[in-house]
Image (spheres, rainbow, N blue to C red):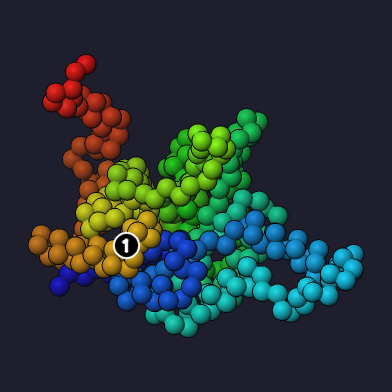
Amino acid sequence: MSDLSTTYLGLALKNPLVPSSTPLSRSLDPVLHLEDAGAAAIVMHSLFEEDVRNDEQMIDRFLVHPDSFGESAGHLPGGRDYLSKLDTYLEQIQAFKSRLSIPVVASLNGSSLTGWVELGKEMQEAGADALELNAWFMPGDPKVSGEALEEHYLSLLQELKTVVSIPISMKLSPFFSSLPHFVQQAEKSGAAGISMFNRFFQPDIDLETLSVVDRVQLSSSTDTLLTMRWIAILRGRTTMTLAATGGVHTAEDAMKMLLAGADVVHMASALLQRGPQALKDVLEGLTAWMEAREYTSVAQLKGSMSQQNLPDPSAFARAAYLNALNSFTPPAGVMY
């Protein structure tokens, strides 16, 4: 029997499959089913900075200063009766920790520096084993440089490190001009791991109503390729946990991520589409593949096809672009 154990943010895991931040973790039952299917840890759904701020404004307006609303104020809940999104989130952490035997990773999603990272301290006190810092700022202002944006992210990480002692993972986007440099700076700033990559839901235009609409676009296996490439490049260049996220639907997807150098593999879209059975299938497929090829452990498998371990490191560099173009053959029967 192959040893599937790995480490994630300094935490010992029984296998490398970790459900990432999804709506499934908004309640206990789905998370219990994921643990039963083999999940080695759980990343909770994100607590958004905007939600906390909206709660604060609502409480201040209706509960702290209700006098200006006359008789209608009598129908408002008392301050002690109102359960904010933060309160709900902290209660969920406590509930998960009391029922699960696997690590629980809380998730913070925000961008400003104005105190929201204090929420991390409350999550730690509620029992979270680690934190995922999902920081993203939409750089639509041409006066904001890439360097300034990176410094902003690092400042968020450093600020969070001052209030928590549990390990912090940064969930990154692929939109960095020099990703390895930023990863190096994140490690120096105290990050214990990075998760690649954040999946952004892009606005669309409805041609019938001529309006901008928001739609959820779930991933497919082809989305793993960008993550796999950067995992392979970063393996051996950082001591932080490398978590691969985005597009893992099959055992083959997971194995490629591990071969490239991922310590853990996150799953999201596959779980939303097929439920806990998707995770169980991937775990069984991974075990069968390793045993068929006589791999004794995930540690033996992990990173064996990273850029540093390949005879030809250019396979993950610019040469791959040229080779792919030169090897393309048009489909038979297509006229040009």
Provide the residue designation for mark 1: 274
Residue in the image at 29% along x and 63% along y: 278
Report the front residue among 316 and 216: 216
Residue 258 drawn above or below residue 332: below
Residue 5's image quarter?
bottom left
Task: Locate residue 291 relative to residue 34 in the image: left or right.
Answer: left
Q: In the picture shown, does residue 313 fall above or below 54?
A: above
Where in the figure is residue 120, as x and y percent of width and height?
A: 60, 66
Foreground residue among 87 and 217: 217
Q: Outermost residue, front direction?
A: 208
Give x and y (percent) for residue 202: 49, 42
The residue located at (84%, 69%) in the rendering is 72
Secondary structure under tag 1 reads: helix
Residue 295 in view: no
Label 1 packing within 10 angstroms: few (<14), some (14-19), many (20+):
few
Q: Amino acid at mark 1?
A: Arg
Screen quadrant of the N terminus: bottom left
**Residue drawn at (39%, 76%) of the image:** 32
Residue 303 placement, left or right of 176: left
